[in-house]
Image (cartoon, rainbow, N blue to C red):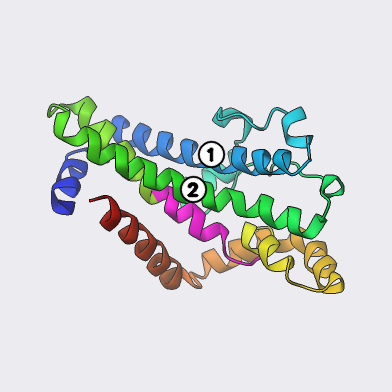
Amino acid sequence: MLHYLQGLFSALDFGSLLAALVRAAAVLVCLAVHESCHGLAAWALGDPTARRQHRLSLNPLRHIDWIGLLMMFAVGFGWAKPVPVDPRYFKNPKRGMALTALAGPMSNFALALLALVLLRVLMPFLPVADWSLALLGFFLQTSQLSVGLGVFNLIPIPPLDGSKVLAAFLPDRQYYTLMHYERYGILVLLVLSFLNVGSISIAWAVNTVWWAMYSLVF
């Protein structure tokens, strides 16, 4: 079955505009779901900041950081505009921040599973045509990219979501120290990406999670 899916997907010419649009659409959907679910989690925990700034939307244009998007296509690592969160609204700020951060990666895993389910359900009924191959390719790319985004964001390096989850288990002094250096995290991640540090471990984790989902669905 996987070979059949790969055959369908490889039928798309990756040098074509259609293939580029399919990948771009998958990236935008993954980012929009990730960021809007941060905002929804914060709102559920009592923080209306994201809702007031219209960041609960699935419209990708509300979440795009154009430099981060360009980096994602150029080097495979990018970012969206961070969803504004005010921890003063949370009854327990550290726990609230951790749950809000965790909502992003968890939403990506849920999206990946949904994309694979739609792929399996629709595949037997679609004709062999350019548009149907593009649609199946979109679901396959969305599942893979969404898992990648979810796993990557669980790395405990600021400003990634994993750092906020880890911070919830730290004493207050270490917590505020970690948050203080959050602004430098992007530079650290760019250097690590440039040096290709940890890429094998991340790829292994992404493939493991995606294969588990694929096996569950197919």
Estimate the x, y position of residue 31 in percent, counting from the top left: 53, 41
Question: Residue at (57%, 61%) from the top-left corner?
Answer: 154
Mark number for residue 106? none
| Label 2: element kind | helix
- Residue 65 visible, this angle: no
Which contiguous range is marked in magenta?
145-157
Dominant secondary structure of the residues highlighted in magenta in the image: helix
Name which residue type carries label 2.
Answer: Asn
**Residue indicated by mark 1:** 33
Name which residue type carries label 1.
Answer: Val
- Residue 72 visible, this angle: yes
Question: Residue at (30%, 30%) from the top-left corner?
Answer: 18
**Residue indicated by mark 2:** 108
**Residue toward you, 115 or 28:** 115
| Residue 115 painted magenta | no
Estimate the x, y position of residue 39 in percent, counting from the top left: 67, 39
Q: Local crowd at mark 1 within 10 Å, few (<14), some, or many (≥20)?
A: many
Estimate the x, y position of residue 213 in percent, counting from the top left: 34, 55
**Quarter occupied by residue 184:** bottom right
Location of residue 26 with respect to 212 vertically, above or below: above
